[in-house]
Amino acid sequence: MNFLDNIDINRFINSLQYMWKGMLCIFIVIFVLILFVYLLNGINSKIEARKKAKEDAQHGSGR
């Protein structure tokens, strides 16, 4: 008895529909997480730049 003899083609095709939808959802979630990390990184770099500019202005006026 061969393993491939037990496969029902219709069920296999139906399972592929679920599989591609699941994979698409996984990629969408990964993409959203990447965008979120880039957004947070951009916000953090702007905050750090403002802090550095403020510190430089305070140290420059005190001399």
Image (cartoon, grey):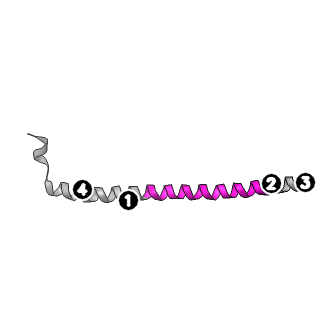
In this rendering, the label closer to the viewer, 1 or 3: 3
Circle 1 residue: 25
Residue bearing the label numbered 4: 16
Q: Give the range drawn in magenta.
A: 29-55
> Could you give the CA–CA distance between mark 4 and mark 2, rounded to whole angstroms?
58 Å
- Residue designated by label 2: 55
| Front in this rendered view, residue 1 or 47 | 47
Amino acid type indicated by mark 1: Cys
Identity of the residue drawn at 67% across and 58% down: 46
Q: Helix or strand or loop: what does disc 3 sit on?
A: loop
Decide which of tag 4 and tag 2 comes sooner along the chain.
4
Mark 3 crowdedness (10 Å alpha carbons): few <14, some 14-19, many ≥20: few
Q: Earlier in the sequence, mark 3 or mark 4?
A: 4
Q: Do the residues labelled 1 and 4 touch (CB within 8 Å)?
A: no
- Quarter of the rendering containing residue 25: bottom left
Residue that mark 3 sits on = 62
Secondary structure under tag 1 reads helix
Give SS at disc 2: helix
Q: Which sits in the foreground, 29 or 38? A: 38
